[in-house]
Amino acid sequence: MKKTLFTALLASMLIAVASPLSAQEENGFKKINVREDFAENGFQWFHDAELLAAGDKTKSNAMTIGWGGIGTLWGRTALTVYVAEKRYTKEFMDKAEYFTVMAFDVEHSNVLRYMGTKSGRDGDKTQALGLHTAYTANGTPYYTEASLVIECKIMYAAPFDPDHFKSEVPKRMYSHFPAGIHSMYIGEVVNAWQK
């Protein structure tokens, strides 16, 4: 009996060592397959505002985004985000290999509001909001208070070229937009977690 109990304990310890919880699982997230499990309307999701983060364990920044796209490109599941040239987060996106896009439940709507009106140049927004930064296995920052985290590896990045604007919509947009022209970042979805 003692030998059986000892064997069972040893086996459970070996399983725990062999398959440790990821940082995301420790923070209450479960891995999802966005092609099968993402139930949001792609035409509405960004309109409702999400949070974009980039950087590393040394320094990172996040900002609220209301523009983006979800789909398939070059045979990959892709997510596209746009960051204006004068935004502090752009510095992090231009150096990053990965970025995260996060959704928050209604009780954290203050996060999106604050991150969309304050600049990381002026202070630590994460600390001001009491958020807890965690990192994926790739070192990409995200906040444990998020309800959904999508991690992307950047496949393409470039600023919009005004010479290629084909309608009055972008021309009017940028004629009075103080943050400057946006850059487009297309990321391959490499991980996703949801609470």
Image (cartoon, rainbow, N blue to C red):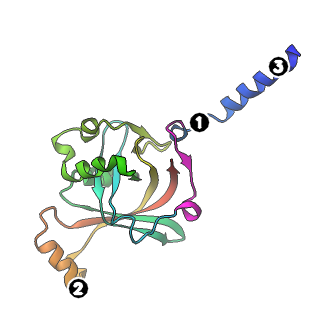
**Residue farthest to the right, as pictured:** 1
Q: Position of residue 35 (x, y in %)?
A: 56, 64
Q: Is residue 35 magenta?
A: yes
- Indicate the secondary structure of the residue bearing disc 3: helix
Which residue in the structure is indicated by mark 2?
A: 167
Percent x, y of residue 115: 25, 49
- Number of the front mark, 2 or 3: 3
Quadrant of res 133: top left
Q: Position of residue 71 (x, y in %)?
A: 47, 70
Can residue 84 be seen? yes
Placement of 189 over or under 193, stated as above or below: below
Residue at 36 percent across and 51 percent down: it is 106
Would residue 62 be seen by someone viewing this image from the given angle? no
Residue marked by disc 3: 5
| Quadrant in the picture for the N terminus | top right
**Circle nearer the N terminus (3, 1):** 3
Residue drawn at (26%, 71%) of the image: 160
Amino acid carrying label 2: it is Ser
Q: Which is nearer the N-term, disc 2 or disc 1?
A: 1
**Distance of label 2 from label 1 (alpha carbons):** 50 Å
Q: Are marks 2 and 1 in contact (CB under 8 Å)?
A: no
Residue 134's place in the image compared with 117, above or below, is above
Task: Name the residue at the front extreme.
Answer: 107
Packing grade of label 2 (10 A; few <14, some 14-19, many >=20) is few
Q: Amino acid at mark 3?
A: Leu
Disc on res. 21: 1
Q: Which residues are magenta?
A: 26-38
Return the disc, 2 or 3, that comes first in the chain's sequence: 3
Looking at the image, do the residues carrying marks 2 and 3 touch, with CB atoms under 8 Å apart? no
